[in-house]
Image: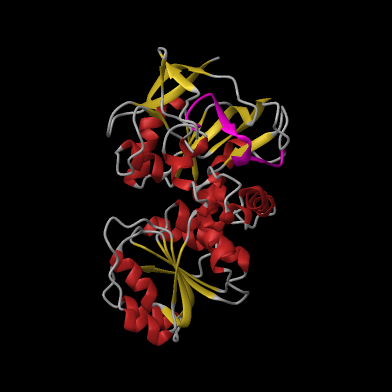
């Protein structure tokens, strides 16, 4: 079938919408009519080849839509179901079987190699195969094909155009707190970075019952927003008395810290904000090796925890987040700004400039 899809043809190039041929779904695959798709930092990192996925490629990995067709072996969803597309995983390796699909042994190949596991493609431009199956979905288009495994059935009464970012960025931040750090009621947490992931972590901390939630950033408007969605305090990381400001809020330090920036100096600030036996989660990918004071870590019994995709089982966690949203306890709609397909490059630019927290391209509806 002919669809319209956004293609990146060269490093740091613009998204270009093209008429593309999309194959029929295979027995284990699902054809989805895309309602909307969020733009994530990872899409832009691949566009700029910071992450070396092959080009030309159809990106997009925060898709939501309606099931149009299912392969003969698909049992998880049916035609007409509302779905969110999440990350690829094999479902068979020890980590997948133990409920940790974000640490699938094939995570890199299934999400970044730009093809099915057998090396084939579903998208073709002028008779030539395009790299696709980015995060096992490639959702920057009017339709796409995804394996049954990473298709999540969702509540049909929820606003479908809003739900795509739950498949990656939103679940990453919220899950880092709820699933990975697992703070108990009354805990204290400090969260560094107030982009979509950090703000989702703040909402997750509030939903988990944390009573001290410190948001840290250098953007005043983001910090103001953080206070309206769950943060109890805000700090500017550039202030000279930052460590003292943390102590003024939590004299003995925080139970938990979370870094979403990937910057070494910020991660060290996060670690130094912890009380003894505290835990620091790290989400942000760092371009440089991290330098830490091992004696400080050992002396205070601190733990560092790397976190991928919020330690989520998407089939369970995404519906939980939707339930919280519908009850007014997870207002992630406050982060979203919609764009039309023709505005996709503007949306990407607004994201990089910090003008939009979570841009979403609305294809239908």
Is residue 228 in view from this perspective? no
Q: Determine if the magenta segment contains residue 218.
A: no
Percent x, y for residue 15? 36, 28
Dividing the picture into quarters, in which one does residue 71 lie? Answer: top right
Q: Is residue 298 above or below residue 14?
A: below
**Front-most of 100 and 144?**
100
Percent x, y for residue 25? 60, 24
Number of numbered discs on residues: 0
Classify the position of the N terminus by image quarter. Answer: top right
Residue visible at 49% across and 46% down? 106
**Front-most of 262 and 49?**
49
Which region shows up in magenta?
138-156
Is residue 119 in view from this perspective? yes
Classify the position of the C terminus by image quarter. Answer: top right
Q: Is residue 45 above or below residue 143?
A: below
Percent x, y for residue 153? 68, 40
Dividing the picture into quarters, in which one does residue 86 lie? Answer: top right
Q: Is residue 103 above or below residue 187?
A: above
**Front-most of 255 and 88?**
88
Residue visible at 57% across and 32% down? 146
Residue visible at 47% across and 78% down? 278
Q: Is residue 103 above or below residue 276?
A: above
Dividing the picture into quarters, in which one does residue 177 lie? Answer: bottom right
Q: Determine if the magenta segment contains residue 147.
A: yes
> On the rendered structure, is 79 left or right of 58?
right
């Amino acid at each position: 079938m002919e669809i319209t899809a956004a293609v990146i043809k060269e490093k740091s190039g613009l998204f270009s919408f093209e008429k593309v041929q999309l194959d029929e779904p295979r027995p284990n695959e699902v054809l989805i009519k895309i309602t909307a798709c969020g733009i994530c930092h990872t899409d832009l990192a691949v566009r700029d080849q910071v992450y070396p996925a092959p080009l030309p490629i159809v990106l997009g990995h925060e898709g939501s839509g309606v099931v149009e067709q299912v392969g003969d072996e698909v049992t998880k969803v049916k035609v007409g179901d509302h779905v969110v597309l999440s990350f690829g995983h094999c479902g068979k390796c020890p980590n997948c079987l133990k409920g940790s699909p974000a640490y699938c042994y094939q995570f890199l190949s299934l999400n970044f190699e730009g093809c099915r596991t057998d090396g084939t493609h579903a998208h073709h431009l002028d008779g030539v195969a395009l790299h696709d199956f980015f995060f096992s979905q490639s959702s920057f288009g009017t339709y796409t094909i995804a394996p049954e495994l990473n298709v999540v059935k969702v509540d049909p009464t929820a606003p479908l155009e809003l739900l795509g970012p739950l498949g990656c960025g939103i679940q990453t931040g919220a899950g880092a707190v709820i699933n990975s750090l697992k703070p108990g009621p009354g805990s204290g947490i400090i969260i560094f970075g107030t982009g979509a992931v950090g703000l989702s972590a703040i909402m997750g901390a509030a939903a988990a019952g944390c009573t001290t939630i410190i948001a840290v950033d250098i953007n005043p408007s983001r910090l103001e927003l953080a206070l309206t969605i769950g943060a109890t305090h805000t700090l500017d990381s550039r202030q000279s008395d930052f460590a003292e400001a943390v102590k003024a809020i939590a004299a003995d330090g925080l139970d938990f810290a979370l870094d979403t920036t990937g910057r070494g100096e910020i991660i060290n600030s996060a670690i130094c904000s912890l009380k003894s036996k505290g835990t620091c989660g790290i989400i942000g990918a760092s371009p440089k090796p991290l330098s830490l004071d091992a004696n400080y870590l050992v002396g205070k019994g601190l733990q560092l925890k790397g976190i991928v995709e919020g330690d989520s089982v998407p089939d369970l966690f995404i519906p939980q987040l939707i339930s919280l949203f519908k009850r007014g306890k997870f207002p992630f709609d406050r982060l979203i700004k919609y764009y039309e397909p023709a505005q996709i490059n503007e949306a990407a630019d607004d994201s990089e400039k910090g003008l939009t927290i979570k841009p979403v391209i609305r294809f239908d509806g």
